[in-house]
């Protein structure tokens, strides 16, 4: 069963080619990562798959359905966390979750959602008063409100401290164990290595390598002088001569 299928996706903004003939398949029950540096085209790609942007070319199927024909059904079955989710600062955590829950015919209870993301004690706090990690977990709770079959996450842990990242990773692993499918983007190779069954490394709007992280590392990432265990960073450097995160 296929979670996401996109073939030869293309999208340009004026003279910028953001996505340049991108293809991949995400199987149901799998966690698939789009890994690439800033500007690689990850957000554009995921927003097309989320039905938020129209591609210039290419085919998209999500859960075997198309946005053109099955827009309503897809909205009910997907959970979406945008790269910069803007939740209302002057709503409480509880009000925010009630609002998102109201978008879906079926879904999880408020108590369940609060428990899953460990925000029970923040129930009555204003969103504006939450820490970065708590806000991010709330954004994921909103994405889980309709008990989705497929979760889209755009850079779910960017900017988070190590403890908040691990907390979020644990909650995503739990979603997986219950049969959920995840498509996420990240520029952290350790995140991809930890969470993803398979990754597509994206650069300049194209997939330049694809496979399970250990396989990519074994075949492409072997540094000439082995001073450390190979990583996906080595794979990216081997393929492009650049580092994934130029800091
Ligand atoms: N709305 C937009 N208008 C013009 N250019 C854009 C827009 N959104 C993204 N881009 C450009 O498209 C390219 C891909 O961006 P993006 O998909 O956000 O990449 P990533 O998420 O991998 O950082 C970048 O060069 C970016 O500057
Ligand atoms: Mg992005």
Image: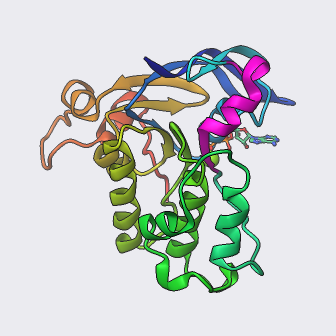
The correct choice, above or below, for 126 with respect to 223 in the image is: below
Q: Position of residue 79 (x, y in %)?
A: 59, 45
- Identify the image quadrant of residue 45: top right
- All told, the count of numbered labels is 0
**Residue name at image x 35 percent, y 39 percent:** 196
The correct choice, above or below, for 204 with respect to 173 in the image is: above
Magenta span: helix, strand or loop, mainly?
A: helix
Nearer to the camera, 63 or 99 = 99
Q: Which residues are magenta?
A: 66-81
Nearer to the camera, 79 or 47 = 79
Is 79 in the magenta?
Answer: yes
**Residue name at image x 53 percent, y 32 percent:** 203
Q: Position of residue 40 (x, y in %)?
A: 59, 37
The correct choice, above or below, for 156 with respect to 2 in the image is: below
Q: Position of residue 126 (x, y in %)?
A: 68, 84
Q: Is residue 159 visible?
A: no
Q: Position of residue 186 (x, y in %)?
A: 48, 47
The correct choice, above or below, for 176 with respect to 26 in the image is: below
Is 242 in the magenta?
Answer: no
Q: Answer with left or right where residue 166 lies relative to residue 215.
A: right
Nearer to the camera, 44 or 219 = 44
Nearer to the camera, 229 or 67 = 67
Q: Answer with left or right where residue 82 lies relative to residue 166.
A: right
């Amino acid at each position: 069963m296929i979670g996401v299928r996109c073939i030869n996706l293309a999208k340009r903004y004026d003279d910028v080619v953001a996505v340049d003939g991108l293809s991949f398949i995400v199987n149901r029950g799998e966690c698939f990562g789009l890994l690439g540096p800033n500007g690689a085209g990850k957000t554009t790609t995921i927003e097309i798959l989320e039905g938020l942007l129209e591609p210039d070319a290419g085919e998209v199927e999500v859960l075997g359905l198309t946005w053109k024909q099955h827009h309503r059904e897809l909205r009910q079955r997907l959970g979406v966390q945008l790269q910069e989710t803007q939740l209302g600062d002057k709503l409480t955590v509880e009000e925010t979750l009630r609002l998102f829950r109201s978008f879906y015919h079926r879904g999880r209870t408020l108590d369940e959602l609060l428990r899953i993301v460990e925000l029970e004690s923040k129930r009555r706090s204003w969103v504006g008063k939450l820490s970065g990690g708590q806000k991010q977990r709330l954004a994921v709770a909103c994405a889980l409100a309709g008990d989705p079959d497929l979760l889209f996450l755009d850079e779910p842990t960017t900017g988070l401290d190590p403890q908040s990242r691990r907390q979020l990773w644990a909650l995503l692993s739990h979603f997986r164990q219950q049969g959920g499918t995840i498509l996420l983007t990240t520029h952290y190779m350790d995140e991809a290595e930890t969470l993803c069954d398979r990754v597509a490394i994206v650069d300049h709007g194209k997939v330049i390598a694809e496979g399970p992280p250990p396989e990519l590392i074994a075949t492409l990432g072997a540094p000439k002088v082995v001073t450390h265990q190979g990583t996906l960073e080595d794979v990216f450097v081997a393929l492009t001569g650049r580092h994934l995160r130029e800091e």
